[in-house]
Amino acid sequence: MNHLSELLSRLSTAENIVIFTGAGVSAESGIATFRDPGGLWAKFNPAELASADGFMANPERVWGWYQYRRNIIDESSPNAGHFAMAQMQKMWHRATVITQNVDRLHQKAGARGVIELHGNIIENHCFECSEPYLDEIDLSSNKNPQCGCGGMIRPSVVWFGEMLPALAMKKAEISAMKSEVFFSIGTSAEVYPAANLPILAKENGAYVVEVNPNETAISDYMNLCVRENSAEFLPKLLIEYKKFLNK
């Protein structure tokens, strides 16, 4: 762990840290990624399953797909990486978790105030009026659930061609700019504007760390690249950090 001495030193003086996560973190809990070789988009057409046009053309197919994914998420549990990130929020009170994931495993692990850039797959809302839909989704009748206004109900995820939630993105950008240490964990860094957050953090003086077994499009911007999974690396990091403080 000698190569982490600079990171440990930075963490010891940091007041604001950011933990920015992508699909690789969820993959460690058995939830398939989208863009990796053999990922979901290699098997399914995103234009049909994750777009407003695809939903309007065939809402039953889209709902079937999301119910399938929800079933997988319901059977999944947070991994050691998720729990380590929640522990980091206890150790650094100004530690912000920003995620591109929609499964809410961070919250299951105890993370608080998670900024969800791509929405979540747990909740639903009206396609027309945007009001939350709190009833259970029942697809047994093969009819798309409807809002009281007559609009169709959809999952509360951000689809291709849609803007990220403005408030969530603004909070994420502010957190990145204020961060002293910024972790980019398990993200391919290919989806913008979210992928710009590590760069924004570094431009504002943060020490930027990538935790990913694979090289990404922004690896060259990093101060430190750790080629491990988060479930392997983060628990070790916390152990080493406690040793560092007790020197």
Image: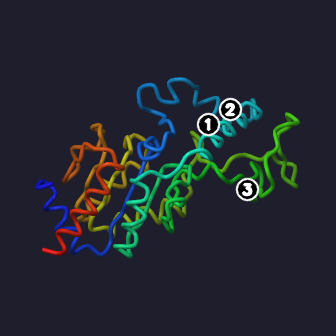
Horizontal side of 218 relative to 164 (left or right) equals left
Quadrant of res 215:
top left
Q: In the rendered structure, are the residues bearing label 1 and label 3 in contact, judged by CB atoms less than 8 Å apart?
A: no
| Type of amino acid under label 3 | Ser
Q: Mark 1 points at which residue?
A: 50
| Type of amino acid under label 1 | Ala
User: Which residue lies at the image location 41% right of the left edge and 42% below the top edge?
Assistant: 24
Q: Which of 150 and 105 is in front in this view?
A: 105
Q: Name the residue under label 2.
A: 54
| Type of amino acid under label 2 | Gly
User: Which residue lies at the image location 16% right of the left edge and 68% below the top edge?
Assistant: 9
Quadrant of res 48:
top right
- Position of residue 121 measured from the top left corner of the image (x, y, whole percent): 63, 48
Q: In the rendered structure, are the residues bearing label 2 and label 1 in contact, judged by CB atoms less than 8 Å apart?
A: yes
Task: Say few, some or many: other residues with alpha carbon within 10 Å of mark 1 (under 14 / 14 to 19 / 20 or more).
Answer: some
Distance of mark 2 from mark 1, alpha carbons? Answer: 7 Å
Task: Say few, some or many: other residues with alpha carbon within 10 Å of mark 3 (under 14 / 14 to 19 / 20 or more).
Answer: some
- Position of residue 11 measured from the top left corner of the image (x, y, whole percent): 23, 68
Q: Mark 3 points at which residue?
A: 130
Q: Is residue 25 above or below residue 93?
A: above
Q: In this view, does 173 lie above or below 61?
A: below
Distance of mark 1 from mark 3, alpha carbons? Answer: 17 Å
